[in-house]
Amino acid sequence: MMKKLFLLLLISIVFVSCNNSGNTNKDAAANTNQSGAVVVKPEHLNEDAFRKKVFDYTSGKEWKYIGDKPCIIDFYADWCSPCRRLGPVLEELAQEYKDQIYVYKVNTDQNPNVSAYFSIQSIPAVFFCPMNDKPQVMVGLYQKEDYVKIINDLLLKPTGK
């Protein structure tokens, strides 16, 4: 009887821990913090998601951003030290501009077709995509203020001026 009870308890613990371990998703764009406020983080895109959210580069058409608000796309690799240092800056920008822009990340090692289409030669390469114009790119690591200036001057500038 004691063995059955112990086995049942062990199975219950394993079941609960397996269900709870699936609740974390590093690629989730939005989560909540302890106070219940929404925390927005950069969204990691694979090739398929990139074609659906940013631009279908396989269509052979000229650049046309398909998002509903401007975006930043960070082309990076996990092994790249400047890319890792840029990560927290982009997380801050995603949170600060959460209602105005999207912040995406594309791993160049895992998404070689997207990287090749945009001729990514050096990383980090950050593309700033306004709604109705071609993207502008910054290659290398810069101060947060430099990214903020481009966001405000290029992505959030009033249209029609």
Image (cartoon, rainbow, N blue to C red):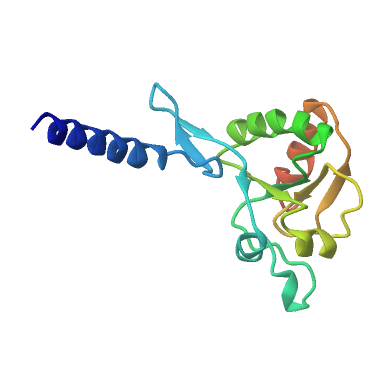
Image position of 91 with respect to 74: above or below: above
Q: Give the image quarter of residue 36.
A: top left
Q: Quadrant of residue 155?
A: top right
User: 83 or 154: which is nearer to us?
Assistant: 83
Residue 94 image point, x, y percent: 62, 36
- Measured from the top left, where is residue 23 in percent x and y? 40, 40
Q: Residue furthest bottom?
A: 60
**Which residue is located at x 82 percent, y 65 percent?**
117
- Above or below residue 39? Residue 52 is below
Looking at the image, which is closer to me, 52 or 160? 52
| Image side of residue 152 versus residue 98, left or right | right
15, 100: nearer the viewer: 15
- Tell me if 1 is positioned left or right of 60 in this view: left
User: Vertically, is 103 above or below 147?
Assistant: below
Q: Quarter of the image holding residue 5?
A: top left
- The residue at 78%/67% (across/down) is 63
Q: Give me the residue at 82% from left, 32% from top.
A: 81
Q: Quadrant of the N terminus?
A: top left
- Image location of residue 18, percent across then percent down: 36, 41
